Image (tube, coloured by chain):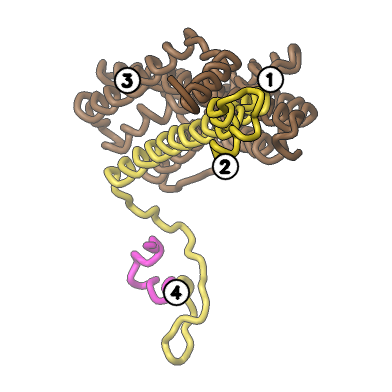
Amino acid sequence: LKGPERETTVHLLAMSKAMPAPKRTFGDTAFPIVLLLAAASILYTMHFVAYRVPIEATMGIVQKIFYFHVPAGYAMYVGATACFVGSCGFLWKGTPGWDALARGGADVAVAMGLILLASGALWAAKSWGVYWTWDPRLTTSLLIVLVYVAYVVLRSFAGSGDAERKFAAALGILGATLIPIIHFSVRLWGGTHPQVVTGKGGGLTHGDMKLGLLYGFVAFTLLSIALIWARARLAIASSRVDEVEQEAVDLGILQD
Amino acid sequence: MQNKTTTDPAAAPSAASSAAPSASTSGVPDGFQKVDDAAPEMQSGEALLVEAYAFIWVVLFGLVLLTWLRQRGLDVRMNELEASIARARNPRPPAKEAAAKRATPDPADGDDGAEKAD
């Protein structure tokens, strides 16, 4: 190479030495696999519920909402637990990784909570005749979703300062304390909401009904893990961009 | 909404008068009154099931799409910032000056060489 091309090449080589290529981590390989498994299991569950699971005698076809409604509630617990663990870890260690886990968990708790509430309301419209009633389980579920909506709104609009992160972490811990209250609300206060899975009445008499629910749990477990992971990666990337922006400000490239 | 209290024909006029909205002389309703013990509207189970599944998919796709778009935006921003920082730390010699240096016939006479190159 001669002339300006050589200069450019030398300059690019110098840049590549200054910025070594990032190493491919275990997470970079495992994440797409989890994502693919989650997508495949969701599709298989939908197929199984649609074609193999029998129609329920009393409620009819609308009962098939159950195979996604209950796993969505469970996935909301998974998200809330991740947010709780991340929040505790952040308050203890103060590292961005724990904070990212908490953010990912809260995002998933909100998404799954919305699915839980909406699918439950549509099912209730048929089986109870109303979309909503102030039943203990419904009310406490709404409350926990609102707590995580508050968390997400706080993190989105209140900046990423240390005080905001600590306040959000406290909110994440508070939200998780509602989980046992929701879970045992039917036993504690009664209400209209049935106890099909944990109760002794047992609505799942047919083997394919039980399998459909099992596949739903597997699919939503994988889905919630994949989504928490994706959102946590996003939060880490966002935090890294903030750091690099600060570096650029220090170098006088950007204005604060 | 159906009114269960109107099943008895004898009671129908009084029930209807209590349930129906009050009408003006022109026959156009000018107010609303609630109906007690209204039967729940019958909804199609198939439609509700489709609505529920559609909502699930919209939420999940929305979350995945938002995540992907935000991640892409962050990647672009990070690349821009890293390139800017690298340029600031390793300033590239201007191409014209480098070309002028090479075009200089006599190292002792740099100014003339630069003029030739320009």
Whether residue A186 is visible: no
Is residue A239 a member of the stretch shown in magenta? no
Asked if residue A123 is positioned above or below residue A10 in the image, the reply reads below
Of mark 3 and mark 1, the one earlier in the sequence is 3
- Say which amino acid is labelled 1: Ser
Q: Give A141 or A229, whichever is nearer the viewer.
A: A229
Helix, strand or loop status at disc 1: helix
Which of the two discs, 1 and 4, sits closer to the camera? Answer: 1
Q: Chain of mark 1?
A: A
The residue to which callout 3 is attached is A41
Expressed as whole percent of the image width and height from the top left, the position of residue A13 reads 53, 16
Is residue B12 a member of the stretch shown in magenta? yes
Q: Are marks 3 and 4 on the same chain?
A: no
The residue to which callout 1 is attached is A87
Which of the 4 image quadrants contains residue A97? top right
The residue to which callout 4 is attached is B20
Q: Are marks 1 and 2 on the same chain?
A: yes
